[in-house]
Image (cartoon, helix red, strand yellow):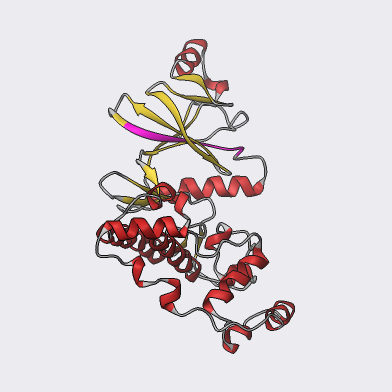
Amino acid sequence: ITAAPRMPFLGPKMSSRLSSMFYTVEVGDTKFTILKRYQNLKPIGSGAQGIVCAAYDTVTQQNVAIKKLSRPFQNVTHAKRAYREFKLMKLVNHKNIIGLLNAFTPQRSLEEFQDVYLVMELMDANLCQVIQMDLDHERMSYLLYQMLCGIKHLHSAGIIHRDLKPSNIVVKSDCTLKILDFGLARTAGTTFMMTPYVVTRYYRAPEVILGMGYKENVDIWSVGCIMGEMIRGGVLFPGTDHIDQWNKIIEQLGTPSQDFMKRLQPTVRNYVENRPRYSGYPFDRLFPDVLFPSDSSEHNKLKECSK
Protein backbone atom coordinates (compact mmCIF):
# COMPACT_ATOMS: atom_id res chain seq x y z
CA ILE A 1 0.00 0.00 0.00
CA THR A 2 1.46 3.32 -1.05
CA ALA A 3 2.16 5.60 1.89
CA ALA A 4 4.38 8.55 2.62
CA PRO A 5 7.34 7.77 4.92
CA ARG A 6 7.14 8.43 8.64
CA MET A 7 7.37 12.10 9.55
CA PRO A 8 10.28 11.88 12.08
CA PHE A 9 12.66 10.99 9.25
CA LEU A 10 11.59 13.75 6.87
CA GLY A 11 13.28 17.05 6.35
CA PRO A 12 11.24 20.12 5.36
CA LYS A 13 11.99 19.72 1.65
CA MET A 14 11.04 16.03 1.53
CA SER A 15 7.87 16.65 3.54
CA SER A 16 6.87 19.42 1.17
CA ARG A 17 7.54 17.25 -1.87
CA LEU A 18 5.40 14.41 -0.52
CA SER A 19 2.59 16.80 0.34
CA SER A 20 2.62 18.00 -3.26
CA MET A 21 1.82 14.45 -4.44
CA PHE A 22 -1.72 14.72 -3.04
CA TYR A 23 -4.65 17.07 -3.37
CA THR A 24 -8.02 17.29 -1.63
CA VAL A 25 -11.37 17.50 -3.36
CA GLU A 26 -14.90 17.32 -1.96
CA VAL A 27 -17.15 14.67 -3.46
CA GLY A 28 -20.62 15.27 -2.09
CA ASP A 29 -20.18 15.40 1.69
CA THR A 30 -16.90 13.48 1.63
CA LYS A 31 -13.35 14.74 1.26
CA PHE A 32 -11.04 12.73 -0.97
CA THR A 33 -7.31 13.33 -0.43
CA ILE A 34 -5.76 11.47 -3.33
CA LEU A 35 -2.70 11.28 -5.54
CA LYS A 36 -2.58 13.99 -8.19
CA ARG A 37 -2.36 11.37 -10.93
CA TYR A 38 -6.10 10.79 -10.43
CA GLN A 39 -8.23 13.60 -11.84
CA ASN A 40 -11.85 14.41 -12.72
CA LEU A 41 -13.50 12.63 -9.79
CA LYS A 42 -17.21 11.88 -10.12
CA PRO A 43 -19.29 9.97 -7.54
CA ILE A 44 -20.71 6.68 -8.85
CA GLY A 45 -21.79 4.81 -5.72
CA SER A 46 -21.74 4.46 -1.97
CA GLY A 47 -22.49 1.86 0.66
CA ALA A 48 -21.67 0.66 4.14
CA GLN A 49 -18.08 -0.09 3.14
CA GLY A 50 -17.25 3.19 1.44
CA ILE A 51 -17.75 5.74 -1.30
CA VAL A 52 -16.70 5.11 -4.90
CA CYS A 53 -15.73 7.70 -7.51
CA ALA A 54 -14.84 7.45 -11.16
CA ALA A 55 -11.56 9.14 -12.05
CA TYR A 56 -9.00 9.46 -14.83
CA ASP A 57 -5.50 8.09 -14.24
CA THR A 58 -3.13 10.50 -15.99
CA VAL A 59 -0.25 8.02 -15.69
CA THR A 60 -1.86 4.98 -17.32
CA GLN A 61 -4.34 7.14 -19.27
CA GLN A 62 -7.22 4.92 -18.19
CA ASN A 63 -10.50 5.50 -16.41
CA VAL A 64 -10.53 3.96 -12.93
CA ALA A 65 -12.76 3.61 -9.88
CA ILE A 66 -11.45 4.85 -6.51
CA LYS A 67 -13.02 3.56 -3.32
CA LYS A 68 -12.50 5.41 -0.05
CA LEU A 69 -13.15 2.96 2.77
CA SER A 70 -15.54 4.40 5.35
CA ARG A 71 -14.00 4.66 8.83
CA PRO A 72 -11.75 1.59 8.29
CA PHE A 73 -10.31 1.78 11.81
CA GLN A 74 -13.38 2.88 13.76
CA ASN A 75 -13.52 -0.53 15.45
CA VAL A 76 -12.15 -4.05 15.10
CA THR A 77 -14.97 -5.13 12.76
CA HIS A 78 -14.33 -2.26 10.33
CA ALA A 79 -10.59 -2.89 10.43
CA LYS A 80 -11.03 -6.59 9.64
CA ARG A 81 -13.31 -5.80 6.71
CA ALA A 82 -10.84 -3.28 5.32
CA TYR A 83 -7.99 -5.78 5.68
CA ARG A 84 -9.97 -8.60 4.04
CA GLU A 85 -10.97 -6.48 1.07
CA PHE A 86 -7.45 -5.17 0.51
CA LYS A 87 -5.80 -8.58 0.92
CA LEU A 88 -8.21 -10.53 -1.28
CA MET A 89 -8.23 -7.95 -4.06
CA LYS A 90 -4.44 -7.99 -3.98
CA LEU A 91 -4.12 -11.79 -4.06
CA VAL A 92 -7.00 -13.03 -6.24
CA ASN A 93 -6.26 -12.90 -9.95
CA HIS A 94 -9.11 -13.88 -12.25
CA LYS A 95 -10.80 -12.23 -15.21
CA ASN A 96 -14.19 -12.31 -13.45
CA ILE A 97 -12.92 -10.88 -10.15
CA ILE A 98 -12.26 -7.14 -9.84
CA GLY A 99 -8.54 -6.53 -9.43
CA LEU A 100 -6.62 -3.99 -7.37
CA LEU A 101 -4.69 -1.51 -9.52
CA ASN A 102 -3.33 0.61 -6.67
CA ALA A 103 -3.83 1.41 -2.99
CA PHE A 104 -2.63 4.40 -1.03
CA THR A 105 -3.03 6.57 2.04
CA PRO A 106 -2.26 10.30 2.29
CA GLN A 107 -1.05 9.95 5.87
CA ARG A 108 2.72 9.89 6.50
CA SER A 109 2.96 7.92 9.73
CA LEU A 110 1.32 5.00 11.49
CA GLU A 111 0.08 7.36 14.19
CA GLU A 112 -1.77 9.46 11.60
CA PHE A 113 -2.94 6.51 9.48
CA GLN A 114 -6.74 6.62 9.06
CA ASP A 115 -7.69 6.69 5.37
CA VAL A 116 -7.43 3.91 2.79
CA TYR A 117 -8.09 4.34 -0.92
CA LEU A 118 -8.42 1.39 -3.31
CA VAL A 119 -8.06 1.90 -7.07
CA MET A 120 -9.85 -0.55 -9.36
CA GLU A 121 -10.84 -0.98 -12.97
CA LEU A 122 -13.86 1.17 -13.85
CA MET A 123 -16.87 -0.80 -15.07
CA ASP A 124 -19.96 0.59 -16.81
CA ALA A 125 -22.83 -0.58 -14.56
CA ASN A 126 -23.74 -2.94 -11.75
CA LEU A 127 -26.10 -5.87 -12.17
CA CYS A 128 -28.96 -3.95 -10.50
CA GLN A 129 -29.01 -1.68 -13.53
CA VAL A 130 -28.46 -4.48 -16.03
CA ILE A 131 -31.40 -6.51 -14.68
CA GLN A 132 -33.71 -3.66 -15.68
CA MET A 133 -32.52 -3.85 -19.29
CA ASP A 134 -33.94 -6.05 -22.03
CA LEU A 135 -31.43 -8.89 -22.02
CA ASP A 136 -31.69 -11.69 -24.53
CA HIS A 137 -30.97 -15.23 -23.39
CA GLU A 138 -27.51 -15.30 -24.94
CA ARG A 139 -26.35 -12.30 -22.90
CA MET A 140 -28.13 -13.51 -19.76
CA SER A 141 -26.46 -16.92 -20.04
CA TYR A 142 -23.06 -15.35 -20.65
CA LEU A 143 -23.39 -13.14 -17.56
CA LEU A 144 -24.41 -16.10 -15.41
CA TYR A 145 -21.56 -18.20 -16.81
CA GLN A 146 -19.02 -15.52 -15.86
CA MET A 147 -20.55 -15.18 -12.40
CA LEU A 148 -20.14 -18.92 -11.82
CA CYS A 149 -16.57 -18.86 -13.16
CA GLY A 150 -15.66 -16.11 -10.70
CA ILE A 151 -17.29 -17.91 -7.77
CA LYS A 152 -15.64 -21.22 -8.75
CA HIS A 153 -12.25 -19.51 -8.68
CA LEU A 154 -12.91 -18.01 -5.24
CA HIS A 155 -14.09 -21.34 -3.84
CA SER A 156 -11.12 -23.20 -5.34
CA ALA A 157 -8.90 -20.72 -3.45
CA GLY A 158 -10.80 -21.48 -0.24
CA ILE A 159 -12.68 -18.16 -0.17
CA ILE A 160 -16.39 -17.65 0.52
CA HIS A 161 -17.65 -14.27 -0.67
CA ARG A 162 -20.68 -14.20 1.70
CA ASP A 163 -22.20 -11.01 0.25
CA LEU A 164 -23.17 -11.78 -3.32
CA LYS A 165 -25.90 -9.48 -4.62
CA PRO A 166 -26.53 -7.55 -7.85
CA SER A 167 -24.89 -4.37 -6.53
CA ASN A 168 -21.64 -6.32 -5.89
CA ILE A 169 -21.46 -7.54 -9.48
CA VAL A 170 -20.33 -5.10 -12.17
CA VAL A 171 -20.52 -5.27 -15.94
CA LYS A 172 -18.92 -3.55 -18.92
CA SER A 173 -20.75 -2.64 -22.11
CA ASP A 174 -19.23 -5.68 -23.86
CA CYS A 175 -20.92 -7.95 -21.26
CA THR A 176 -17.72 -8.62 -19.30
CA LEU A 177 -18.69 -9.35 -15.68
CA LYS A 178 -16.64 -9.01 -12.50
CA ILE A 179 -17.37 -9.69 -8.82
CA LEU A 180 -16.31 -7.14 -6.22
CA ASP A 181 -16.59 -6.10 -2.55
CA PHE A 182 -14.79 -8.64 -0.37
CA GLY A 183 -15.29 -6.95 2.99
CA LEU A 184 -17.31 -9.91 4.30
CA ALA A 185 -15.36 -12.69 2.59
CA ARG A 186 -13.89 -15.52 4.71
CA THR A 187 -11.70 -18.55 4.16
CA ALA A 188 -13.56 -21.83 3.77
CA GLY A 189 -11.39 -24.18 5.80
CA THR A 190 -14.14 -25.16 8.23
CA THR A 191 -17.88 -25.00 8.67
CA PHE A 192 -18.77 -21.55 9.99
CA MET A 193 -21.03 -20.65 12.86
CA MET A 194 -20.72 -16.91 12.37
CA THR A 195 -22.84 -13.80 12.59
CA PRO A 196 -26.02 -14.26 10.54
CA TYR A 197 -25.69 -10.75 9.13
CA VAL A 198 -23.91 -11.79 5.97
CA VAL A 199 -25.46 -11.43 2.55
CA THR A 200 -28.14 -8.85 1.91
CA ARG A 201 -31.45 -10.34 3.06
CA TYR A 202 -32.99 -11.13 -0.34
CA TYR A 203 -30.00 -13.31 -1.28
CA ARG A 204 -29.47 -14.95 2.12
CA ALA A 205 -29.36 -18.76 2.23
CA PRO A 206 -31.57 -20.71 4.69
CA GLU A 207 -28.43 -21.82 6.57
CA VAL A 208 -27.61 -18.16 7.26
CA ILE A 209 -31.17 -17.15 8.17
CA LEU A 210 -31.49 -20.03 10.64
CA GLY A 211 -28.05 -19.62 12.22
CA MET A 212 -26.69 -22.94 10.95
CA GLY A 213 -23.16 -23.84 9.99
CA TYR A 214 -22.42 -23.11 6.36
CA LYS A 215 -19.76 -23.30 3.71
CA GLU A 216 -19.53 -22.34 0.03
CA ASN A 217 -23.19 -23.27 -0.43
CA VAL A 218 -24.27 -19.80 0.77
CA ASP A 219 -22.68 -18.28 -2.34
CA ILE A 220 -24.38 -20.80 -4.63
CA TRP A 221 -27.77 -19.94 -3.12
CA SER A 222 -27.09 -16.25 -3.74
CA VAL A 223 -26.17 -16.94 -7.36
CA GLY A 224 -29.43 -18.86 -7.78
CA CYS A 225 -31.42 -15.94 -6.37
CA ILE A 226 -29.63 -13.54 -8.70
CA MET A 227 -30.24 -15.83 -11.69
CA GLY A 228 -33.94 -16.03 -10.85
CA GLU A 229 -34.10 -12.26 -10.54
CA MET A 230 -32.46 -11.85 -13.94
CA ILE A 231 -35.00 -14.20 -15.52
CA ARG A 232 -38.09 -12.83 -13.79
CA GLY A 233 -37.06 -9.18 -13.66
CA GLY A 234 -37.83 -8.99 -9.93
CA VAL A 235 -36.56 -10.24 -6.55
CA LEU A 236 -37.46 -13.88 -5.83
CA PHE A 237 -37.79 -13.64 -2.04
CA PRO A 238 -38.41 -9.99 -1.02
CA GLY A 239 -38.61 -10.52 2.75
CA THR A 240 -39.19 -7.54 5.03
CA ASP A 241 -37.15 -9.13 7.85
CA HIS A 242 -35.38 -12.45 8.46
CA ILE A 243 -38.59 -14.22 9.57
CA ASP A 244 -40.55 -12.97 6.57
CA GLN A 245 -37.59 -13.95 4.39
CA TRP A 246 -37.78 -17.53 5.64
CA ASN A 247 -41.55 -17.63 5.17
CA LYS A 248 -41.27 -16.45 1.56
CA ILE A 249 -38.67 -19.12 0.83
CA ILE A 250 -40.72 -22.05 2.18
CA GLU A 251 -43.96 -20.77 0.62
CA GLN A 252 -42.35 -20.96 -2.82
CA LEU A 253 -39.93 -23.87 -2.41
CA GLY A 254 -41.73 -25.93 0.22
CA THR A 255 -41.06 -26.98 3.81
CA PRO A 256 -37.58 -28.51 4.15
CA SER A 257 -36.95 -32.20 4.75
CA GLN A 258 -36.51 -33.89 8.13
CA ASP A 259 -32.80 -34.30 7.41
CA PHE A 260 -32.57 -30.52 7.17
CA MET A 261 -34.60 -30.09 10.36
CA LYS A 262 -32.20 -32.32 12.32
CA ARG A 263 -29.40 -29.85 11.67
CA LEU A 264 -31.25 -26.99 13.36
CA GLN A 265 -30.73 -25.80 16.91
CA PRO A 266 -33.65 -26.92 19.16
CA THR A 267 -35.29 -23.49 19.52
CA VAL A 268 -35.02 -22.78 15.79
CA ARG A 269 -36.27 -26.25 14.93
CA ASN A 270 -39.28 -25.78 17.19
CA TYR A 271 -40.20 -22.55 15.38
CA VAL A 272 -39.74 -24.04 11.91
CA GLU A 273 -41.75 -27.19 12.72
CA ASN A 274 -44.62 -25.11 14.09
CA ARG A 275 -44.96 -23.17 10.86
CA PRO A 276 -47.64 -24.30 8.40
CA ARG A 277 -46.34 -26.93 5.99
CA TYR A 278 -45.96 -25.88 2.37
CA SER A 279 -45.58 -28.11 -0.64
CA GLY A 280 -44.01 -25.31 -2.68
CA TYR A 281 -44.88 -23.99 -6.12
CA PRO A 282 -44.31 -26.10 -9.23
CA PHE A 283 -41.42 -24.94 -11.39
CA ASP A 284 -43.67 -23.72 -14.21
CA ARG A 285 -45.41 -21.38 -11.78
CA LEU A 286 -42.13 -19.87 -10.54
CA PHE A 287 -40.70 -19.70 -14.06
CA PRO A 288 -43.50 -19.97 -16.62
CA ASP A 289 -42.75 -20.54 -20.29
CA VAL A 290 -43.39 -16.89 -21.06
CA LEU A 291 -40.14 -16.12 -19.20
CA PHE A 292 -38.26 -17.95 -21.95
CA PRO A 293 -39.57 -16.16 -25.04
CA SER A 294 -38.42 -16.69 -28.57
CA ASP A 295 -38.29 -12.94 -29.18
CA SER A 296 -37.67 -9.82 -27.09
CA SER A 297 -41.24 -8.47 -27.45
CA GLU A 298 -42.62 -11.29 -25.26
CA HIS A 299 -39.90 -10.66 -22.69
CA ASN A 300 -40.81 -6.97 -22.55
CA LYS A 301 -44.46 -7.84 -21.92
CA LEU A 302 -43.53 -10.17 -19.10
CA LYS A 303 -41.31 -7.63 -17.36
CA GLU A 304 -44.18 -5.14 -17.41
CA CYS A 305 -46.52 -7.73 -15.89
CA SER A 306 -44.07 -8.63 -13.11
CA LYS A 307 -43.69 -5.03 -11.88
Residue 199 locus on image (x, y percent): 55, 59
Outermost residue toward the bottom in this view: 258
Residue 3 among magenta residues: no
Closer-to-camera residue (29/101) = 29
Q: Residue at x 69, y 83 (%)?
A: 273
Residue 69 among magenta residues: yes
Q: Residue at x 73, y 82 (%)?
A: 270
Up-down relation of residue 255 to residue 137 (above or below) = below
Residue 212 locus on image (x, y percent): 62, 73
Up-down relation of residue 178 to residue 58 (above or below) = below
Residue 292 locus on image (x, y percent): 31, 67
Classify residue 37 as left or right of residue 19. Answer: left
Quarter assignment of residue 44: top left
Closer-to-camera residue (225/52) = 225
Q: Residue at x 36, y 65 (%)?
A: 152
Total count of labels: 0
Up-down relation of residue 302 to residue 98 (above or below) = below
Closer-to-camera residue (303/18) = 303
Question: Magenta segment, principal secondary structure?
Answer: strand
Residue 23 locus on image (x, y percent): 48, 18
Q: Which residues are magenta?
A: 63-71
Classify residue 9 as left or right of residue 269. Answer: left
Classify residue 291 as left or right of residue 216. Answer: left
Outermost residue toward the top in this view: 13
Quarter of the image where the N terminus is located: top left
